[in-house]
Image: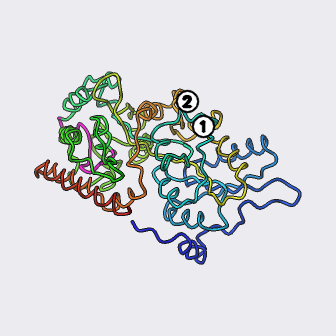
Amino acid sequence: MKHRPLALLAATLLSTGLVACSSPGEQNAGGPTVLDVWLMRDSVSDAFQKEFEAGFEKAHPEIDLRIQIQEWEGIGEKVTAALASNDAPDVIEVGNTQVARYAQSGGLTDFTDRVDDLDGEFWLEGLAEPGAWEGRQYGIPYYAANRVVIYRTDLFRRAGIDATKIRTRDQWLAATEKLNKDGVQGIYLPGQNWYALAGFVWDEGGDLAVQEGGRWKGGLDSPEAARAMAFYQRLQALGRGPKDSDESRPLQADVVAKGQVAQVIATPGGAGVIAQKNPALKGKLGFFPIPGKTADKPGAVFTGGSDLVVPAAARHQEEAYTFVKELTGDTWQTKLALAMSYVPNRTTLATAVASDPGAAAMAVGAAHGHATPNTPQWAAVEAKNPIKDYMTAVLTGRDAATEAARAAQSLTTTLNSGS
């Protein structure tokens, strides 16, 4: 993806009204400092937002907090423009894999010297790693979400399978094969669920791409990735998922709601969508972490979620840091996790979601979470996504080694195109 110069992009978006018209960092005459914050749609509920605002302003009466909820669509260019302007908000929520893109521009505040103060040693790696750029920490982990196995408790019970005892891939395959009969799909797994494949690659000790001598090299042609794809192929065959599409075509929640599907890989929120589409399934959906190669360690997962960043142009840096420290601290992380069924930003708070089965299953996987390669060019990879093409090619019978080499070369070319 080519990025327009920051100044030009800022001017373009300001002229079209895409940057907020309020004046971040303004001071009420004789009153508290106004702190403008952008949070993303659905990252907080209305109730949580009101509770946090009241609690924060009571603890910090010198700050008048103003939170604006932003939409995900088009947010990349809007943030880029804000960072290049003199009218930036004080704090911005960004997707964890977007931080490198913004840090590369020089538009973010460096928090490296405050990591210890924020208990950074306990941060989830899948949030902390992409929040860093060239050895400096710009993004502060906010919350995480990752995929788990959502399963039909009634179908498992009928098959005599105890989900709590599925700890390894081999056990998972055996259970899925047992479920995959009499009109029931053992698992609904679309052929292009590359997030799931990435977890299997990491389990094997490989990666989607690695840096060598300052340049990126695609990793799908490695022996580790080959083993991961072979496992994916075995698992995918125990259902009737399409080989040439992803979770959105068709929406996998629709498939699970309409048919006899024993399992699906999704974030726990997917269970609510399924039950909404088919109320008869309410109370019949459970969760367990994606199994690992061995029983002592759950499967690796792609960690989605958000980081908080402070624009270098923000007028009130200390007040912004106070906000970040509060929202990412123990008290509000615990409240947020319970309110939104998220995984807290650090491993020491995993027990905070023990009462929420879906979030608890996520937390187990999140402790072994990963992020995509930390480079601004990853957005360009996802735009054309050779990983999906590779998966479909292998699943439809083409030579796995040839297709892996093709995909790896595509990753190599794209990831180095901005260097």
Q: Is residue 357 above or below residue 232?
A: above
Q: Which mark is residue 333?
A: 1
Q: Which structural element holds mark 1?
A: helix
Q: Residue at x 32, y 44 (%)?
A: 256
The kind of secondary structure the magenta stretch mainly shows is: loop
- Residue 183 position within the rendered picture, expressed as x and y whole percent measured from the top left: 19, 39
Disc 2, SS: helix
Residue that numbered label 2 is attached to: 349
**The N terminus sits in image quarter:** bottom left
Does the magenta segment cover residue 126?
no
Q: Quadrant of residue 37?
A: bottom right
Image spot of residue 260 (x, y percent): 26, 40
The residue positioned 37% from the left and 31% from the top of the image is 288
Point out residue 395 in the picture as x, y percentages from the top left corner.
Answer: 16, 48
Q: How many marks?
A: 2
Residue 185 visible to an observer of this rendering: no
Residue 337 in view here: yes
- Tell me if 122 is positioned left or right of 312 in this view: left
Q: Amino acid at mark 2?
A: Leu
Whether residue 147 sits left or right of residue 200 in the image: it is right
Front-lying residue, 301 or 250? 301
- Queried whether the magenta region covers residue 193, the answer comes back as yes
Q: Up-down: is 149 above or below 46?
A: above
Residue type (three-letter) at the residue carrying disc 1: Gln
Query: Residue at left 87%, top 61%?
Result: 29
Residue 21 position, x and y percent, is 68, 69
Quarter of the image with the C terminus is bottom left
Q: Are marks 1 and 2 in contact (CB under 8 Å)?
A: yes
Q: Which region shows up in magenta?
A: 181-195
